[in-house]
Amino acid sequence: MNALEHIRDIGPAAGFPIAREAILSWQLQAGAGVIVRPQRPVRQGMIVDLWLNPLWPAPPRRLRGEDLIVPVGSCIVEDVIDTDRQAGFVYRTLPGHLETGVETFLVSIDDDERLIASITARSVPGNPLLKAVEPVSVASQKMMAARYAAALERLVERAAG
């Protein structure tokens, strides 16, 4: 089982409303090059399909009217966290996803009034090819967690001006 924990201070607590909205509306994923459908506010029980834009941060290329994107798989939102000091969600992958496991996306205000992004995951490769190159899969998960946190930080900074 691979365990991932990526924590990043993304600024002052004043940015919480922006960070909350970004996490609960999938802007976090979009900012990291992940396309989520349907594009609706996060809610418990929601099933989403994920694709990766391999050219991120550039927009995906189009061929014959279709975006050239890589299918990742589907997930179901198991829990939504939405309080005065925390916002986020937990999703579990569904059969056919590249990974098998659970991932949590959370932004919270800590005791020092700092905004903390936390991306955690517990998973195993869900595809025989990925099992054969598991270190690459683990490295990819770490890279994506860093991209998610950086995307959230950019959104908060942009909103602050």
Image (tube, helix red, strand yellow):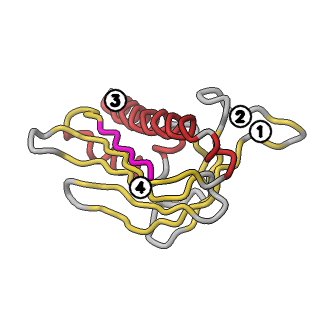
Q: Position of residue 40 (x, y in %)?
A: 54, 60
The residue wearing badge 2 is 60
Mark 1: few/some/many CA within 10 Å (<14, 14-19, 20+): some
Name the mark nearer the viewer: 4 or 1. Answer: 1
Of pointers 1 and 2, the one earlier in the residue sequence: 2
| Residue topped by disc 4 | 24
Q: Name the amino acid type tagged 4.
A: Leu
Mark 4 vs mark 3: which is more N-terminal? 4
Q: Identify which residue, 15 or 150, lies in the foreground.
A: 150
Q: Position of residue 14 (x, y in %)?
A: 21, 40
Classify the position of the C terminus by image quarter: top left
Q: Which residue is mark 3?
A: 157
Circles 4 and 2: CB atoms closer than 8 Å: no
Q: Are marks 1 and 2 in contact (CB under 8 Å)?
A: yes
Circle nearer the N terminus (2, 3): 2
Q: Residue beneath label 1, please?
A: 68
Compare marks 3 and 1 and give the one earlier in the sequence: 1
Q: Comparing marks 3 and 1, which lies closer to the viewer?
A: 1
